[in-house]
Amino acid sequence: MSAGRLNRLLRKKEITSRQILDSIIRQAEKVDPEINCYISKAFEQAEEQAGSADKLIAESEAGYFTGIPVGIKDNICTRGLKTTCGSRILENYDPVYNATVIDRLDGHNYVLTGKLNMDEFAMGSSNENSYFGPVKNPWDLSRVPGGSSGGPAACVASGQAICALGSDTGGSIRQPASLCGVVGLKPTYGRVSRYGLVAFASSLDQIGPVTRDVRDAAAMLNVICGHDPMDSTSLDKQVPDYTSYLQQDMKGLKVGVPRQLMVPEVDTQVRKAVENSLKLLKDMGAEIEETSLPSLEYALSVYYIIAPSEASSNLSRYDGVRYGYRAQDADGLRQMYKKSRSEGFGEEVKRRIMIGTYCLSAGYYDAYYEKAQKVRTLIINEFNQAFSKYDLLVSPTSPTTAFKLGERLQDPLMMYLSDICTIPVNLAGLPAISIPVGLSDNGLPIGFQFIGNILREDNILKAAYNLEQAVNFNHRPKLQGNQDD
């Protein structure tokens, strides 16, 4: 059930938070040994939180997420519960503070089920780069769940949490949401505080919800949004009630379909599902038109210069000195740095650090990093022009459905193409949402992406809600534990 539906049952005293949590724990015991969503479970702490929530509900003090089990991606700091970023180098890191989003959820008396698996330091599109093993897609255990928030998406899809928080640097919430048949929302850059989010690429990272429906995503946004003086990039803007935009009214909404996001790599069945969704939007009164943003052709190249460059800088702090993994048998400081980082980081993280260091090095900075930032500005300007004409832009979320585990590990370029439809959104700091709109012939979910202008979450939520109602996607994975109790 969605958090909204469970909240109504809690308020009517037809169910308790403890009963909801017990069902989540039973499901996790049944299916997580195969799926591998959780890095750290917090079920004992969750039972205490559920008991406290039930007391509040008895006193009629229930908010939307009071007593609702939520999983947290393991790059978001939680005091007293390990935050590993899916990496050996932070295997035993225990934060002494909460991320701002955690404090805000605490203020609504949510129930923390645990920390969720992810590609190491959020670098990956398949969740195969985790030190703690790959996450498997609940729809087909031989396939990937997407990445880097594969743990949150698979967790919600398989019923091991009602909602989850992920992070999105180049599509890391939306792409796994698409591959796992759930809703994933990336807010406007700066809308949600990054304080306590372990940095990958600071100009691109953003925290957002992974949920079972659009209403839950809007409600989660209500909780986690807002200005935070602890984050210098946090926007000091009033937060509306995002659930108030969930109205069935699409008349006159202008929708652009960028041809650069309907790339040849888009699978035939994905393309068909997108075309069917566009027809539904048109039937509801939206005005659909193909458009062109020529600079999007370079978005992937720009991203894989800027993101690794920022990662190279951000990850330089992991040197084995103050915290994190330290090699034991090093001969001197220099060798300790080298061995600690060589043994502590995985292959993909090392690849991106080297790419980023190269792009920032003397003689290459102007040719790569500076040029990439200029093209990023062109991309932003083209989005601004598009939004002077359209309320929304739309595309597939992922060019394909979930691919096989191991299929792209030896071909990084093919792996990077998984994010071709999502990366431009992060480069421009825009809000976007992915919702499931159908299944492929072999029963795998297909996602549809709505992109809005800066701070126009209202448009993407309204459109996503309308399409969600029209599609009525009510499928779920056929897992061992998914029988109704």
Image (cartoon, rainbow, N blue to C red):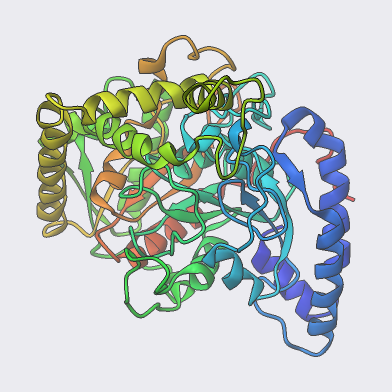
Q: Residue at x 40, y 38 (%)?
A: 397
Q: Is residue 299 above or below residue 379?
A: above
Q: Position of residue 77 (x, y in %)?
A: 59, 55
Question: Which residue shows up at 29% across the image and 28% down it?
Answer: 357
Task: Where is residue 121? Give x, y as percent.
Answer: 50, 37
Nearest to the observer: residue 291 or residue 280: 291
Q: Is residue 467 visible?
A: no
Q: Position of residue 331 (x, y in %)?
A: 57, 19
Q: Looking at the picture, does residue 478 appear above or below residue 95?
A: above
Rendered location of residue 408, percent (x, y):
48, 14
**Extreme residue in the front direction:** 332
Q: Quadrant of residue 442?
A: top right
Residue sitting at 58 percent across and 21 percent down?
Answer: 343
Residue at 67% x, 37% y is 91
In the image, residue 381 sits, relative to residue 231, either above or below, namely above
Please state which of residues 350 and 460 is positioned toward the viewer in this rendering: 350
State left or right for residue 259 relative to residue 96.
left
Q: Does 149 sit left or right of 298 as displayed?
A: right
Q: Quadrant of the N terminus?
A: bottom right
Q: Residue furthest bottom?
A: 59
Whether residue 219 is visible here, answered yes or no, is: yes
Asked if residue 144 is positioned above or below residue 82 in the image, the reply reads: above
